[in-house]
Structure formats: structure tokens, C-alpha cells
Amino acid sequence: MGKAVKVKKVKLFIGVIFKDLPLLAAIKKILTAKFGIIDLESHILEFDYTNYYEKELGANLKRKFFSFRNLISGDKISAIKVITNRLEKNFSKDGRRCLNLDPGYLNDAKIILATIKDYSHRIYLKDGIYAETTMVFSKTAFKPYPWTYPDYQSKEYIEIFNQIRSIFMQQRKNV
């Protein structure tokens, strides 16, 4: 019989899809209050990979990623997704979201995203939240899977996640 080992902590990140800079500033402040100091903040990226969010959020959408200094236990990602869903609802106007929050985590080997959408490659966690392995780290960089969202397959996103992983790897050395 195998013996369970203590699971290593992972690096939380949150992607924000938004339209208005004041809203981004407000959510950044709340995310910092809830999850701690941000140790990487990406530049603002164009979000033009899909029009999936345009009906609800509007056109000319942007994306920004934040990663947090405090490492978490991976089993916390479902509770974090519940919190980010609540924040989306709190910032909604007339029943429509004004931003989209995508929490996930990474470790030395993979990127996991939390979602409320079930599909064949997703695993149910709890509270209506699923987990998806979105990328794998191979040799020198993250690599997408066939199901990885098109934006996450972009060179820009992969560079950001490689930077976050470098921070994470340094943190692990210092523990």
C-alpha cells in the first residue's frame, strides 16, 4: 500500500479580463487584501483571442495577470474560485459581469486553472468547481495541451507563466 506524502505548496495567480482601468485598480486592491502581496504583475495584454466575453463585458477587452507571494495549498483553489466568483458578482451591473477573474496555480511541473465548467478533461473538486491541467512544463518552458485555451497558448502568456515559475522556484529554494 502506498503512503501519502505531504503535498508541497503551489503558486497562486489570477488572470483578470476587464475593460476599465479604474475597475482593474479596485479589484487589484481587493485581491491584495484577500491573497497577500503581489510579486508579479503582468503588463496589460489585449484580449482578442475570442469574442466569448464581449456580450457580457463589452468590446476591446484587456487581460492582466497577478501572482501572489504567499504560497498556497493546491486544495484551496476551489475556495479561491468561489471567492473570485463572488467578486465578479459584486462588481456586476444590471446582472452582467464587468470583469472575469480566472484563478489558478502553478508548480514546477504544471499550470492548473479553476473553472465552473465541466468537460472531459476536467476533474471535479467541490462546491461546483473543477480543475484543469492547462499546461505542462517541459525542459525550459510551459507547453500547452490540445485543450488549452488559445490565449494561454500565446507566446506572451507562456513568457508570463515562465516568469511566475522562476519566482516560484526561487521561493522553494529559500524555504
Image (cartoon, rainbow, N blue to C red):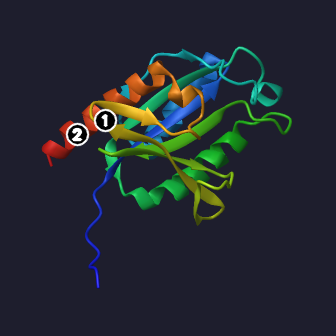
**Which residue is at the far right?**
94
Of residue 53 and residue 90, the one placed in the foreground of this image is: 53
**Where, quadrant-wise, is the N terminus in this rendering?**
bottom left
Q: Position of residue 137 (x, y in %)?
A: 34, 39
Q: Position of residue 28 (x, y in %)?
A: 51, 30
Q: The residue tagged with tag 1: helix, strand or loop?
A: helix
Q: Where is residue 19 in the image (x, y as percent from the top left)?
A: 67, 19
Residue 95: image quadrant is top right
Residue 169's label in the rendered image is 2
Q: Which residue is drawn at 36% across and 28% down?
A: 40
**Which residue is at the far front?**
146
Of residue 115 and residue 17, the one placed in the foreground of this image is: 115
Amino acid on which disc 2 is placed = Met
Amino acid on which disc 1 is placed = Arg
- Determine which residue is flagged by label 1: 165
Question: Does the CB distance between marks 1 and 2 fall below 8 Å?
Answer: yes
Looking at the image, residue 61 lies above or below residue 72? above
Looking at the image, residue 162 lies above or below residue 85? above
Of residue 63 and residue 26, the one placed in the foreground of this image is: 63
Q: The residue tagged with tag 2: helix, strand or loop?
A: helix
Is 34 situated left or right of 128 in this image? Answer: left
Looking at the image, residue 163 lies above or below residue 60? below
Q: Residue at x 52, y 52 (%)?
A: 80
Q: Does the rendering let one see residue 123?
A: yes
Q: Does the rendering let one see residue 26?
A: no
